[in-house]
Each structure stands twice: as structure tokens, then as C-alpha cells.
Amino acid sequence: MTDRKRVFSGIQPTGDPHVGSLIGALSNWVRMQSEYDTIYCVVDLHAMTAPYDPADLRSKRADVAKMLLAAGIDPSRSLLYYQSEVPQHVELSWILGTLTGLGQLERMTQFKEKADKGGQNLGLLAYPVLQAADILIHRVHAVPVGNDQAQHLELTRDLAERFNSRFGEVFPVPERITPEIGARVMSLTDPTSKMSKSDPSSKSRILLTDGTDQIMKKVKSAVTDTGTEVGFDRANKPGISNLLEMFSFFSDRSIDDLVSEYRALGYGTFKIAVGEAVAEGLKPIRDAYEGMSDAEVGEVMASSAARARKMAERTMISVRERVGLA
């Protein structure tokens, strides 16, 4: 690690990474490696707040780690580890939990949404405190988040300030980094909803492991809009606008340039071009993923976890001393 600003982000090992994950998060993670000291975490403890199969969790977390490496996370430039292998996350979470008001947690939008669906448990309620510990344990300076996680980052900032005020300065108050492009990729079957790995329809998303034929089929069947003219208008042409944003990302061309070329060619021709661009863009990731052994991934994760534990322990030495546990 260097003296550059430190950044942290995490991903849950639930479902399969898709194009929305790549455009909205992973591509930014890869880019940030050249500007920041980057710490990335497969947050397997967070995945336990909903019913799950242990064998599936074990498999999924290894799969997600492999995909992150295939997408360009470089272990020589970034820490990449499993959250559960750095127990200081949980230790700090307990301490921060003693500073967190119950009302704050009950007001969290995601908790209310999931609680309304009958998924209430202590882990779900305390999820944002563990998330704050994930960030603060490495004393990071910034966190890349979309709008759906902004409320959780605000709680993290609040807890950092509260701890520092009560016990003395230990934690930087992390800033928010908003992704520059593609922060919200929409479903192919419902372009008014975010692309999600939890959507019951497999046609709604393009997986990073999908082959060319699967990608072409999904793009060709993507819901579009009335009319035949290709144009960017999120309100009136959400389907075509969503495809244009994906096309722009994978072709490295501006949306205006793409609209100018495809405006009058019809949706069919446009969709074929989109599918080809996506397939070509995902091929290097898929090839790297398929060429990586489980042993290689395990070695990277174990090595990074050892380094992460040392970093986290340095923080906890300070924390324990400040709160009276040492």
C-alpha cells in the first residue's frame, strides 16, 4: 500500500455477476486501481441475512472471487479477500453497534423493504453497522456507491464522527465516489426496473459468463418501445435508451454517435449491433474466468486475507485502547 487515498467496496456472493454489475461497479473498481489504494471484499457474512444453502454460499463466493479477478481486479495492486476471513470486521461491528440508535436502523430503506417481505432478523437489522465496520476497519477515505447505498454510507459517516467525538480521532470520515457512467443498467425485460441478479427471469440480464449465442438471443428479445427510430430518451424510450447505454460502454463510442448511425436503421439492425458489441466486450472476461483454476483463486484470496488481517488489526489496536478494552 502507498500514501494514496484508500478506497473500499464489497460485493455479495449471491446470484451471478451480470452486465449491470460490470458497468455500474466492477469497471469502476478496475479503473480505480490506478488512482487509489483499493480494497475489495466478497462480503459473505452479509449474504447470510437471508435463507441460504451452505454449499451454495461456499461455491458462490469462490465464483464471485474468480469473476472479479477475470474482470481485471489485480491482486498486485488491490486487496481482494473474503470478509469472513478477517474477523476484525465483526469485532468492530459490535463496538459500532453500541453507538448506533435502534431508530436509525429501523429507518433504513432496505431494512423496511425486506422486513415488509417477512425477512426480519437481527442480522438484517444490523447489516448497515457491519457494512460501516467493513469500511472503517481499513480507515478508508472514500467509497464508490450508487444511490441505493447512499443511506448506508451516511450512517457510516455518522458512526465515524460519533466514535471520533467520543473516543478520539481514529477514523477518517469516508467520502462518496459516484460512478461516472452506467450507474444504473436496467432490466432487458422491464427497462423501468434495475437489472438484478434476483430477478426470476433469466432473460432480464446478461451474465458475464454468457456465450455469444445467449447474449444475442437476450438482446434480440429485449423489450423495446413504440416506434422504430433509435433515440435516447429515458422517459419515453427506456428500452432503447438502456441498450444505447450498454452499446456505448462496450463500443467505447458516445451515445450521440451511435444514435446518429442507427437512428433510421430500425430496432432489429440496432439490436444485432448491440449484441455483437456486448459479446465482443465480454469475451476476454469469460476467457480469463474459464482459464483460471480454483487453486489459483484460493491462493490469491488467502494471501490477501492475511494482509487484510494485519491492516485491520492495526486499526483494532487503536480502537481497543480508545474504548477501554486494552
Image: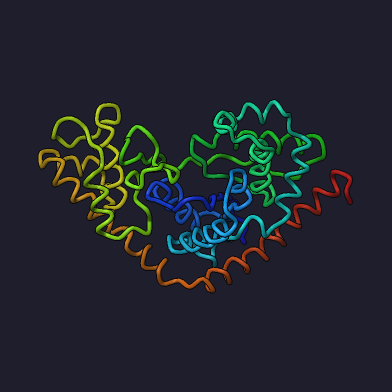
Could you say where residue 28 lies in the image, as x and y percent from the top left?
A: 45, 50
User: Taking 118 as reference, is 289 left or right?
Assistant: left
**Does residue 3 lie above or below 233 as drawn?**
below
Work out whether residue 29 or residue 113 is closer to the camera in this orientation and state it.
113
Q: Determine the residue positioned at 54% across, 63% down.
A: 77
Q: In which quadrant is the N terminus drawn?
A: bottom right
User: Taking 200 as reference, is 297 left or right?
Assistant: right
Work out whether residue 96 or residue 77 is closer to the camera in this orientation and state it.
96
Q: Determine the residue positioned at 25% across, 27% down.
A: 236
Work out whether residue 166 or residue 247 is closer to the camera in this orientation and state it.
247
**Does residue 78 lie above or below 144 as drawn?**
below
Could you say where residue 256 lies in the image, as x and y percent from the top left?
A: 22, 40
Could you say where residue 40 lies in the image, as x and y percent from the top left?
A: 56, 55
Colour scheme in the image?
A: rainbow
**Does residue 278 lie above or below 194 as drawn?**
below
Work out whether residue 18 or residue 260 is closer to the camera in this orientation and state it.
18
Q: Quadrant of residue 259?
A: top left
